[in-house]
Structure formats: structure tokens, C-alpha cells
Amino acid sequence: MCAPYLLSGILDIGKTNYDEDESGDAKYLKKMAALIAVFLALLAVQTFALELFDLGYSGKMLAALAPTVPVFCMLVATVKNYREMDEFMQRVQGESLLWTINVICFLSFGYGMLEMVLGVVPPIGVIWILPAVCLGSGLMNFILMRRDHAE
């Protein structure tokens, strides 16, 4: 029953009366909260499906990739939110993302050099790249906003 409402809110299909009264930030936060809830639900379903059922190769692939759908929707919502920001906030967001990507690239390069020289280093899964970018970008946003408010 709530799936059509949730999807319409996520995909910006249709409008209700209270949607017009909300600010863009409030709608963005509600959309992100709903998408995080869907992600967590799909993650739970994935975990139980992989543990309880003898899935074939394609079933395991579907179960593994199911939680990526709300993550993709979160990325689309973030881009839409970025386009609605004023120039100052776009500059801060852009600079924080540049810093984050450069730091992650630098760290991965250094890690690769250690791996090449030492041969054996603890493996780090690529699943941690997106959370590292999100966390790093949020941290850099905080630092840049404090710096800009201090000036």
C-alpha cells in the first residue's frame, strides 16, 4: 500500500498538497530517509535469502544487487538536490567532493605501492569506496563550511 506512495516520492511522480509547502531540503531529507529504509529492508531480505534459500547463480546475483537500486536512487536524488543549491553551496559541495576523491585516490595509490613492495597487505573491499566518499565528503563539507563562516 505504501510502495506506490514511496516510489512516487522517490521518483518525483505526482504531487500532494503538502509537497508544495515543504522546502527543497525537507523533501530531500525525507526522500533520503525513505531510500535508506528501503536499502536496509532490501539488505535484510538479501541476508535472509542468501542464508535460508539455496539460490542459483542468477538468484544470488539478483539478491546481491537488489540493495543497489535504492543506492542508485540516492545518487540521483543527490544530483537533483545539488542542482537546486545556490552557487555558494554548489562551490562548497564541489570542493568537498574534489578533496574527498583526491584523498581517497592518494590513499589507494599509497596502499597499492605498499601492496607492490610488501606483497601482502590486508585486503580492502571495493564496497567501502562509496561509504568512504560519502563520509569524507560530509566531513569536508563541515570543515569547509566552518572555514567559510570564519572568514
Image (cartoon, grey):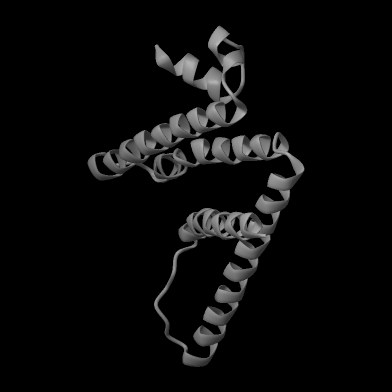
Q: Quadrant of the C terminus?
A: bottom right
* Vertical side of 1 occupied by 80: above or below: below
Which residue is located at x 69 percent, y 58 percent? 95
Q: Quadrant of the N terminus?
A: top left
Which is nearer the eye, 91 or 45?
A: 91
Q: Viewed as shown, does residue 7 lie left or right of 56?
A: right
Q: Please identify the quarter of the rendering in which residue 82 is found.
A: top right
The single residue placed furthest to the right in the displayed view is: 87
* Vertical side of 86 occupied by 92: above or below: below
Measured from the top left, where is residue 10 in percent x and y?
55, 25
Which is nearer the eye, 119 or 7?
A: 7
Which residue is located at x 51 percent, y 41 percent? 71
Measured from the top left, where is residue 102 in percent x and y?
65, 68
* Vertical side of 99 occupied by 111: above or below: below
Q: Viewed as shown, does residue 111 lie left or right of 14?
A: left
Measured from the top left, where is residue 48 in percent x and y?
27, 39
Which is nearer the eye, 7 or 17?
A: 17
The single residue placed furthest to the top in the displayed view is: 17
Which residue is located at x 38 percent, y 35 percent? 42
